[in-house]
Amino acid sequence: MIGKKAIDFCLKDHEEKEHCLKDFKGKWIVLYFYPKDNTSGCTKEAKEFSEKKEEFDKLGAIIIGISKDSPKSHAKFIEKHNLNILLLSDEEHKVLEAYGAWGLKKNYGKEYYGTIRSTFLIDPDFTIRAQWKNVRVKGHVDKVLEELKKLQEEK
């Protein structure tokens, strides 16, 4: 998807307020898809993005996390872990599917459909400039931050 236009969407946050991708025109966007609130890997990823939020802010970037959890689940997740990033709910997994972050997974020999942990770096003109699929959480946030800095130096 690198080089393609980001697919617009509108989803609700933990307070049921709707946010659309187009609302963030002129900003860099870190769009990350994660499987489930309050699971170990997803909590670690959300906390690391929250810890680095100020650095992303200085680079003019907003962090948006999307999962199929409900706004109510997001509210509990945010409160429990003191998160400061925008989390959006895609209960029907339409946005997850549009970005290729929904697919067949295997766990303990069972196959099922679910969220494929993925991250996209979108420039202020809504062009996808970088992507990571099947993300391993350890060190991922730093990789995204470094790539953002590199891309901004090129512009």
Image: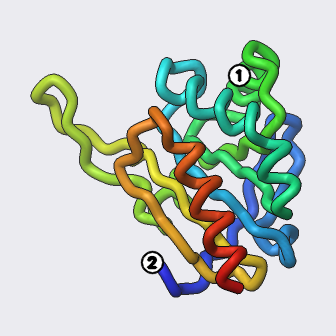
Q: Which residue is mark 2?
A: 1
In the rendered image, the vertical position of residue 9 relative to residue 44, given as above or below: below
| Amino acid type indicated by mark 1 | Phe
Residue 7, image quadrant? bottom right
In the rendered image, the vertical position of residue 63 relative to residue 75, given as above or below: below
Q: Nearer the viewer, mark 2 or mark 1?
A: 2
| Amino acid type indicated by mark 2 | Met
Q: Which residue is at a point 75% across and 34% down the rendered structure image?
A: 50
Q: Which residue is at a point 57% across and 25% down the rendered structure image?
A: 44
Residue reaching furthest to the left: 109
Q: Position of residue 51 (x, y in %)?
A: 75, 32
How packed mark 2 is, by other alpha carbons closer than 10 Å (few <14, some 14-19, many 20 or more), is few
Which quarter of the rendering shows the C terminus?
A: bottom right
Please tell me whether mark 2 sits on a helix, a strand or a loop.
loop
Residue 108, image quadrant? top left
In the rendered image, the vertical position of residue 103 relative to residue 91, given as above or below: below
Query: Mark 1 and mark 2 in contact (Cβ < 8 Å)?
Result: no
Q: Which residue is at a point 58% across and 19% down the rendered structure image?
A: 38
Please tell me whether mark 1 sits on a helix, a strand or a loop.
helix
Does 150 sit left or right of 26 as displayed? left
Q: Position of residue 80 (x, y in %)?
A: 75, 13
Mark sitting earlier along the chain (2/1) = 2
How packed mark 1 is, by other alpha carbons closer than 10 Å (few <14, some 14-19, many 20 or more), is many
Which quarter of the rendering shows the N terminus?
A: bottom left
17 vs 84, nearest the viewer:
84
Does 77 sit left or right of 26 as displayed? left
Q: Position of residue 72 (x, y in %)?
A: 75, 27
Does 67 sit left or right of 9 as displayed? left
Q: Which residue is mark 1?
A: 77
Q: Position of residue 58 (x, y in %)?
A: 87, 55
